[in-house]
Amino acid sequence: MKILKILVFKRSIINSLKCICIFLISNLTVAQSSYLNLDVENDLYFLTDEYYSSGIFIEIGKVVEKDSIKKFKIWELGQEIYTPSDTDSKDFKNYDYPFGGWTFLKYVLQIEKKNNSFFEYGFQFGLTGEWSFADRMQNFYHEKIINADIPSWEGQIPKALHLNIFTSYYFQTEITPKIFVYRKFKAILGSQRMAIETNFGLNYGINVNDKISNPLYVNSDRLGIYFGLNPSFVFHDFMLSGKGLQKEEALFTAKSKTLRLIFDLGFSYKFKNWKFIYIYKNRTPDNFLQPKEQHHYNKISVSYFF
């Protein structure tokens, strides 16, 4: 009877350990299958407030299928703000960029084609002009948070409803176990933007630029360093032209440059379920009115994996 009790006791321990192991494994899987991300891009760190002035993006992604082929579903809510260098003036003669806001919801489906490469497609659905609430957001930020002058927001781009669709293919090539070359090719077709974009990047350690590497694909605790180049050919930019299907006409526009470049230098650090990213960005002019050859701004990103 005593031996039977011991066997029952041991069996209960074994069953308990099995349950604990199953629980830990299932939670570990969940921890590696979803993430929540906040991106903030701003030129305030360089004491400027002009051109592409601000971007705030909230993104959530998860694995939707776990087979031999991995699939990832991503939703993003974002807002971009554009202003001239002279934000106080109400005279269009002083402007070198239209006031404009673009608030959107984006959906992306990524499919792993083979090891280290992905195909994705999706859409952006959003609003521009006063409907984007960008003017109210920036004015609130200037008045309540940084105690700065309120921009005039004269002649901002028209109120309009927009839809962009896009597709892209990106992949990485391993040079050493810690050094990767990233490449991405993207095409955008829509009323807000039409463009062909590319990314070329050299990355050491954990991936830094999550826009050309799925953040769930490399999920380890370490440091990352990144240098990249982002050339784009822009054929239509509503944020400059104000030309679309809307009835309202743009009061001020600027001729868009077709070829644009963005240089990236970034660092990332992942600790347990948290990942932090800092990227310095150097951007060439978007239009022919901008007197400066470079525009500097930073991206700060925080991700939590669960």
Image (spheres, helix red, strand yellow):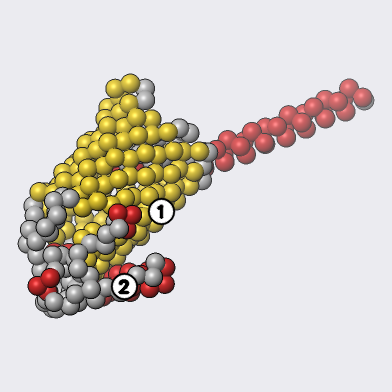
Most foreground residue, 31 or 58: 58
Circles 2 and 1: CB atoms closer than 8 Å: no
Q: Is residue 288 above or below residue 206?
A: below
Residue 65 appears at what percent x and percent y? 41, 42
Residue at which label 2 appears: 149
Asked whether 2 or 101 is in front, the reply is: 101
Measuring from the top left, give residue 287's x and y in whole percent. 10, 58
Residue occupying the point 30% across, 28% down: 180
- Left or right: 80 with respect to 268? left
Which structural element holds mark 1? strand
Is residue 70 visible in this depiction of the protein? no
Q: Which of the numbered marks, if any, corresponds to residue 38?
A: 1
Mark closer to the observer (2, 1): 2
Give the class, few, some or many, for how many residues have Cα within 10 Å of label 2's Cα (few <14, many ≥20).
few
Q: Is residue 228 above or below residue 126?
A: above
Disc number for residue 275: none
Query: At 51% from the left edge and 42% from the top edge, which residue is drawn?
Result: 273
Residue type, mark 2 in image: Asp
Q: Left or right? Give the position of 34 relative to 23.
A: left
Q: Which residue lies at the image location 19% right of the left edge and 75% below the top edge?
A: 89
User: Residue 288, image x and y in percent?
Assistant: 7, 58
Position of residue 237 measured from the top left corner of the image (x, y, whole percent): 14, 60
